[in-house]
Image (cartoon, rainbow, N blue to C red):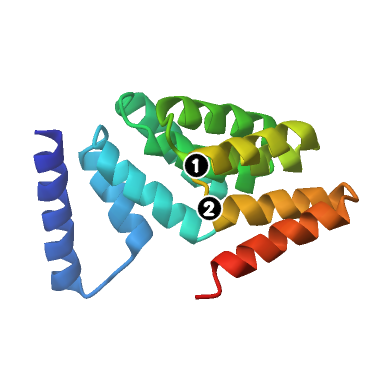
Amino acid sequence: TQRLAGLRSQLRTARETARTGQTNDLAIYRAAIAQSPDDWILRGRFGEWLSQHGDAAGAVEQWRKVTELAPHASAPWFQLANALEAQGKSAEAIAAFEESARRQPGSAAALIGLGLALASAGRADEARAKYEEALRRQPDSAEARVNLAQLLAQQGRAAEAEAMYRAVLAANSN
């Protein structure tokens, strides 16, 4: 029923846009959310839109609400973590990435995001452990290998970093 109400709201907004010729996405999203405040899918789309348009604070607000409205969903935690990281809120981003990884136990992406947040917070050893765990879960992850290589290079472990970069290049040379 919530999804249906959200779709009806979007249809009314689309009709109004067609009638007036105005396409103000921000106003459209706000009007739709005012009509369907508990539509977590709509709020998620708005959070994505806000992130794409550089409003990390607004995105965080939407993703926090989505995590409340859809406690069963795992992806909103990942999106919330990314938005928090974009705001430079490393500690909160780490906590959200940890929640995302907990909710998606097989997800290499959640571990890579957690590794990035840990690395940006200066917690290199923990970041390395997360990248390595991501590689155990998804051995062909170029993203995990590149991030691990960058971390090794920053730690002055040039030979290990070079070997990791070469492995990524070899795996992706097809």
Residue 119 placed where, x, y %? 74, 41
Residue 61 placed where, x, y %? 47, 37
Residue 77 seen in render: yes
Residue denoted by label 1:
108
Residue 46 placed where, x, y %? 36, 50
- Under mark 2, the amino acid is Ser
> Which residue lies at the image location 63% right of the left edge and 41% below the top edge?
131
- Under mark 1, the amino acid is Ala
Quadrant position of residue 77: top left
Depicted 126 relative to depicted 15: above or below? above
Residue denoted by label 2:
141
Residue 16 marker: none
Mark 2 and mark 1 in contact (Cβ < 8 Å)? yes
> Which residue lies at the image location 78% right of the left edge and 55% below the top edge?
161
Q: Is residue 94 left or right of residue 110?
A: right
Most foreground residue, 35 or 125 = 125
The first of marks 1 and 2 along the sequence is 1
- Classify mark 1: residues with Cα within 10 Å, few (<14), some (14-19) or many (20+): many
Most foreground residue, 140 or 68 = 140
Quadrant position of residue 91: top right
**Is the N terminus in the top left, top right, bottom left or bottom right quadrant?**
top left
> Which residue lies at the image location 27% right of the left edge and 35% below the top edge?
37
Residue 157 placed where, x, y %? 87, 50
Residue 89 seen in render: no
